[in-house]
Amino acid sequence: MTETRADNVSWLTQEAYDRLKNELDHLSGSGRIEIAQKIEAAREEGDLRENGGYHAAKEEQGKIEGRILQLRHILENARVGEAPRTEGVVGPGMTVTVAFAGDDEEVTFLLASREESGSPIDVYSPKSPLGAAINGKKVGESASYTLPNGRSMAVEIIDATPYAGV
């Protein structure tokens, strides 16, 4: 294992970090104020037991608070910029090409935090079953991981290069 494999670190591009920071600032500032106003307006409508607007606003408040906690955790554990990478070794920030056993087709994706959703190619988390199985492997090596149905899938690493963006 190399330094790129820390379990609690999420490597983010500057754009992804800024986007998540802006979302956190909005939700913990004006987002909280807006939902509090919705709850207060619904509370003024009367009987809370049969007030659908009130219950919907309280549920939305719970989702906002959950997202705030999630964003804080991501940002606290984020490293911004280029992940330290070694050409030919699978790790976060690498564009990976794999071939699945019994299939002639190759699949290429970015191994990165799922918060990198702006990427022009598919993004697989290093914590996903496939990502965890191939993390640290070298080109030419094989790995296997468990599918949701309980079956095992073998995969061979064809290529691993640093992600260069668009």
Image (cartoon, rainbow, N blue to C red):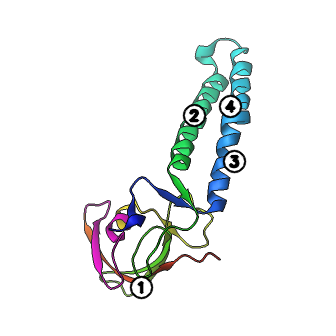
- Name which residue type carries label 2: Glu
Q: Quadrant of the C terminus?
A: bottom right
Instruction: Please give left or right for residue 6 compared with residue 78 in the image.
Output: left
Label 4 and label 3: CA atoms lie apart by: 14 Å
Query: In the rendered structure, does residue 81 fall within the stretch colored magenta?
Result: no
- Mark 3 is on which residue type? Asn
Residue identifier under label 2: 65
Question: What is the secondary structure assignment of the residue under circle 4?
Answer: helix
Q: Mark 3: which secondary structure?
A: helix
- Mark 2 and mark 3 lie on one chain; the one further toward the N terminus is 3
Above or below residue 138? Residue 8 is above
Q: Secondary structure at mark 2?
A: helix
**Which residue carries the number 4 mark?**
32
Tag 1: residue type?
Answer: Glu
Q: Is residue 149 magenta?
A: yes
Residue, far top? 47
> Is disc 1 placed on a helix, strand or loop?
loop
